[in-house]
Amino acid sequence: MNDPTILVLASLAEGDKHGYAIMEDVVRFAGVRLGPGTLYGAITRLEQRGWIRPVGSGDRRQPYKLTAAGRKCLEEQVAGIERVSRAARERLGQA
C-alpha cells in the first residue's frame, strides 16, 4: 500500500500536520518514505480536489487539515482496500 494520496489522507485523519510531519508519520504507520516531490505533488492534488485545506500558521511550515470530503474519500478508499484484502485472503485460503 503506497498510494501517496491515501497515505496523506490517512496521516491527516489523525490531525493537522505540515509536510515533514506527514512524511514522518507515513514512515511510522506504513513503512513508506515519500520523497518531497511525491508528497507535495499529492498535497497539491488533494488540495485541488478539496480533500485537504491549508490551516493558518504563524510558522513558516504550512499545516494541512482533512476536509469532510477528504474524510469521506478516505472512508471509501479504506472500504475498498478491505474488500480487496478480504478477497485476497479467501483466495489464498486464509479466510
Image (tube, rainbow, N blue to C red):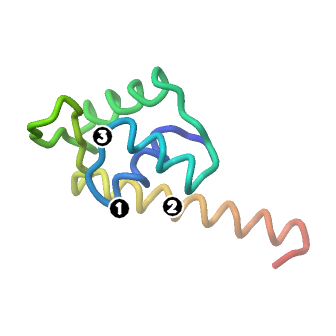
Q: Nearer the viewer, mark 1 or mark 3?
A: 3
Instruction: Compare residues 93 and 34 and report the one nearer the observer.
Output: 34
Q: Secondary structure at mark 1?
A: loop
**Residue 91, horizontal then vertical, whole percent:** 86, 66
Instruction: Compare residues 29 and 70 and report the one nearer the observer.
Output: 29
**Quadrant into which the C terminus falls:** bottom right
Instruction: Compare residues 23 and 95 and report the one nearer the observer.
Output: 23
Q: CA distance from mark 1 to mark 3?
A: 13 Å
**Residue at the image point whose x is 64% and y is 48% from the top:** 31
**Residue 45, horizontal then vertical, whole percent:** 35, 29
Which kind of residue does numbered mark 2 sit on? Val
Earlier in the chain: of badge 2 and badge 3, it is: 3
Task: Kindly identify which residue carries mark 3.
Answer: 18
Q: Nearer the viewer, mark 1 or mark 2?
A: 1
Which kind of residue does numbered mark 3 sit on? His
Earlier in the chain: of badge 1 and badge 2, it is: 1
* Residue 58 shown left or right of residue 49 in the figure: left
Task: Kindly identify which residue carries mark 2.
Answer: 78
Task: Kindly identify which residue carries mark 1.
Answer: 14
Q: Secondary structure at mark 2?
A: helix
**Residue 92, horizontal then vertical, whole percent:** 89, 66
Q: Residue furthest bottom?
A: 95
Q: Are marks 1 and 2 in contact (CB under 8 Å)?
A: no
Which kind of residue does numbered mark 1 sit on? Glu
* Residue 7 shown left or right of residue 50 in the figure: right
Q: CA distance from mark 2 to mark 3?
A: 23 Å
